[in-house]
Image: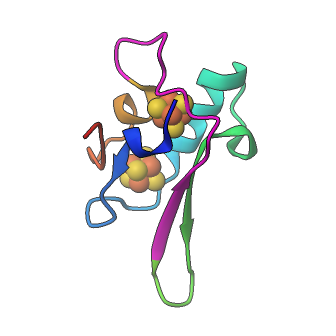
Amino acid sequence: MNQAQIRLSLEECTGCRACELACSFHRTQTFNPALSSIHVLSNNRTGERRYQVDVSCDVCKNEAVPLCIKYCAYKAIKLP
Ligand code: SF4
Ligand code: SF4
């Protein structure tokens, strides 16, 4: 369990936040971005984006592919 185990490329990320929905489903079987381990934050004024992965990320150990990776249509998240 290590937040350094997934990487998000902000150059490829569009800020759609589908990864947050996927992660909340992994964690709670509900779609609630507030319960996601990953958060993508966009500044609506400047367009600047940043992300954070908190310590609750278990790298989807029960999944063949981490759900945030699987459902990012832009292939912005990767394992190192
Ligand atoms: S699903 Fe992919 S493109 Fe969308 S916010 Fe997450 S990392 Fe960015
Ligand atoms: S690897 Fe799994 S637990 Fe970690 S942020 Fe992605 S979906 Fe959430």
Residue 55 image point, x, y percent: 62, 41
Residue 73, placed above or below residue 52: above
- The answer to which image quadrant residue 27 occupies is top right
**Is residue 6 shown left or right of residue 36?**
left
- For the C terminus, the image quarter is top left
**Is residue 10 shown left or right of residue 19?**
left
Residue 22 visible here: no
Residue shown at 57% from the left, 81% from the top? 44
Residue 79 image point, x, y percent: 29, 36
Residue 48, placed above or below residue 65: below
Was residue 44 drawn as part of the magenta stretch in this picture? no
Residue 45, placed above or below residue 74: below
- Given residues 7 and 41, the one toward you in this image is 7
**Is residue 27 shown left or right of residue 74?**
right
- The answer to which image quadrant residue 66 occupies is top left
Residue 10 visible here: yes
Residue shown at 48% from the left, 21% from the top? 60
Residue 29 image point, x, y percent: 69, 18
**Is residue 47 shown left or right of residue 52?**
left
Q: Which residue is situated farthest in the bottom direction here?
A: 46
Magenta span: predominant SS is loop
Was residue 53 drawn as part of the magenta stretch in this picture? yes
Which segment did they paint magenta? 49-65
Residue 15 image point, x, y percent: 46, 61
Residue shown at 57% from the left, 43% from the top? 20
- Given residues 14 and 7, the one toward you in this image is 7
